[in-house]
């Protein structure tokens, strides 16, 4: 029960890594709020973890404000904010769709900035809190056909460090995780060709893809008191990909 009664928001909590976090955090005692545009899957996860679903589009500042206000009204505070939602469309930059580039920035980075902003406002009132963002190993190392994604994920890492400096005096810790290739719908959507997927798997030093549950366990450590002296950190969960 490392997160007993900890009020936790998880954006993008309807599938993949976010869903795995929701399930694990609930087992550890957290009161989980699932924030997602996907109402059907989001409600299903919320029901599974005996939590609450709030339909949220992180590209809309009003939605983010409402998400935090409704959470505080329902549970009385906000202990943990997880900026997890993300998108990825592989393409060379010169060929990439303009709208998809804008959405990548708005969802992956701008949404996390505003999510963090309004979380900090609440956490300062309480005198404590934890913010965790899901970056990527591609925020540390570059990859072709991934320019907007790499840009936003590296931005999340530096956002984490800068915000940690601002909030440490308020007893608010800010960290991020940097998953590598994880066996999620996003990975399979990005690489639908099985031969290409297998070639990518063989490039990973550990010769396998990670699981959402493995990422969730690292996230649990960072948001719990086990990491009480950790802030401004970016932890890789990537089978050695960034080291390669």
Image (cartoon, rainbow, N blue to C red):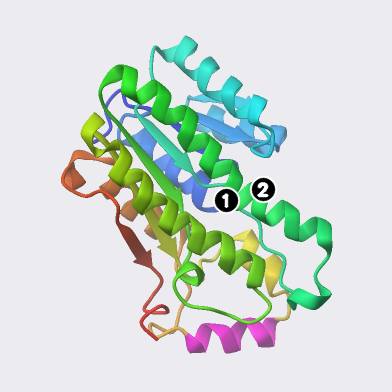
Which element type, helix, strand or loop, lies under badge 2? helix
> x and y percent of residue 220 in the render?
31, 46
Q: Nearer the viewer, residue 189 or 78?
A: 78
Q: Is residue 55 visible?
A: no
Answer with left or right where residue 230 lies relative to residue 5. left
Q: Is residue 173 above or below residue 125?
A: below
Residue extent of the magenta highlight: 194-203
Q: Position of residue 145 (x, y in %)?
A: 68, 78
Residue at the spot of label 1: 109
Q: Residues within 10 Å of mark 2 (few under 14, many from 20)?
A: some
- The answer to which quarter of the image holds residue 98 is bottom right
Residue 184 on the magenta span: no
Q: Quadrant of residue 143?
A: bottom right
As drawn, is 232 to the left or to the right of 7?
left
Which image quarter is the C terminus in? bottom left
Place of residue 57 in the rendered image (x, y in percent of width and height, measured from the top left): 68, 35
Residue highlighted by disc 2: 106
Name the residue: 57% across, 59% down. Answer: 152
Q: Position of residue 217 (x, y in %)?
A: 33, 52
Q: Identify the residue at horizontal 56%, vertical 35% (top origin).
A: 45
Any mark on residue 77, and which? none
Q: Is residue 91 left or right of residue 235?
A: right
- Give the number of callouts: 2
Residue positioned 68% across, 56% down in the render: 104
Q: Residues within 10 Å of mark 1 (few under 14, many from 20)?
A: many
């Amino acid at each position: 029960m490392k997160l007993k009664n900890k009020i936790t928001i998880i954006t993008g909590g309807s599938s993949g890594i976010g869903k795995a976090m929701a399930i694990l955090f609930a087992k550890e005692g957290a009161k989980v709020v699932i924030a997602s545009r996907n109402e059907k899957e989001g409600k299903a996860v919320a029901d599974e973890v005996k939590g609450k679903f709030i339909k949220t589009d992180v590209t809309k500042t009003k939605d983010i404000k409402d998400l935090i206000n409704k959470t505080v009204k329902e549970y009385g505070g906000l202990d943990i904010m997880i900026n997890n939602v993300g998108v990825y469309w592989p393409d060379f930059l010169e060929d990439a769709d303009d709208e998809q580039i804008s959405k990548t920035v708005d969802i992956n980075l701008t949404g996390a900035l505003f999510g963090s902003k309004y979380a900090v406002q609440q956490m300062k009132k309480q005198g404590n809190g934890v913010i965790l963002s899901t970056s990527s190993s591609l925020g540390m190392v570059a990859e072709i056909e991934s320019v907007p994604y790499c840009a936003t994920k590296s931005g999340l890492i530096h956002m984490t460090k800068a915000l940690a400096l601002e909030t440490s005096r308020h007893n608010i810790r800010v960290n991020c995780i940097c998953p590598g290739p994880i066996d999620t719908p996003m990975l399979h959507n990005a690489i639908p060709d099985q031969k290409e997927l297998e070639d990518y798997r063989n490039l990973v030093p550990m010769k396998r893809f990670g699981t959402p549950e493995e990422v969730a366990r690292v996230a649990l450590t960072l948001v719990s008191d086990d990491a009480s002296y950790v802030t401004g950190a970016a932890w890789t969960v990537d089978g050695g990909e960034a080291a390669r």
